[in-house]
Amino acid sequence: MLTRATTGRALLAPALLLGVGTGAVCGGYSLLYGAILKPLPYKNSESIVRVWDSESETSMRHLSARQFEVLRSIGDLQVVAYSTSSMHVRSGSTEYPTIKGAYVTEGLLSLLGAEPTTGPLFAGSEQRRAVISARLKMGGKTPKLGDVLLVDGQPLEVAAVLDSTFWFPDYGTALWVVQRDLPGGREKPATVVFSA
């Protein structure tokens, strides 16, 4: 014989199961969206691809200079590269703590839609120059256009300042050294990004 208490328990179990199942599905989708499905915060992110070489199914490695040049020779692709680094920076007589930075080839920042708040992004410059984030503070203030920073022993002029909301390859990066050749030189591999 069913009583009201038995009927209530019989209805409660499926309701709890449905609630737990719905919560698990929503949580799983949120993780999947955040890790895989959410678009990158860059202009034309649907056409940007990161390329790496694989020694096995479980290991990835950066592309070599030769592989970079082969990709660059394909006419329909805009191929750029970057290499992250901890940079030692000096301004005048003051040395600052190590700054997280990246060596990038020309065109990478504009491919990602970086909009400088001051100064132009590079257009065919033969010299390496520095692009900094407005987040970069040296002595309590952001360096300005034309300032010369000694980055890893090399004098670099600040050519542009990017909005503090721009980040690449991660939010901690505040200095980009833009150059024509592959970051790190011919002997050091770099991460390659291209857009179709």
Image: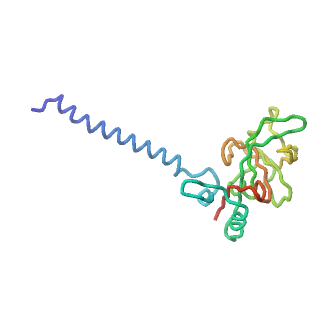
| Residue 69 x, y percent position in the rendering | 72, 66
| Residue 167 x, y percent position in the rendering | 68, 46
For image coordinates 78% across by 48% down, the residue present is 131
Residue 48 can be seen in this image: no
Left or right for 13, reference 179: left
In this orientation, which residue lies closer to the viewer: 192 or 42?
Answer: 192
Answer above or below: position of 65 versus 88.
below
Query: Residue 50 falls in which quadrant of the image?
Result: bottom right
Q: How many marks?
A: 0
Q: On the rendered image, what quadrant is the N terminus found in?
A: top left
Q: On the rendered image, what quadrant is the C terminus found in?
A: bottom right
Query: Residue 151 falls in which quadrant of the image?
Result: top right
For image coordinates 85% across by 39% down, the residue present is 90
Left or right for 125, reference 182: right
In this orientation, which residue lies closer to the viewer: 67 or 176?
Answer: 67
| Residue 174 x, y percent position in the rendering | 74, 43
- Residue reaching furthest bottom? 75
In this orientation, which residue lies closer to the viewer: 135 or 61?
Answer: 61
| Residue 114 x, y percent position in the rendering | 71, 51
- Residue reaching furthest front? 56
Answer above or below: position of 60 versus 175.
below
Colour treatment of the image: rainbow
Residue 137 can be seen in this image: yes
For image coordinates 86% across by 56% down, the residue present is 127
- Residue reaching furthest top? 5
- Residue reaching furthest right? 93
Query: Residue 110 falls in which quadrant of the image?
Result: bottom right
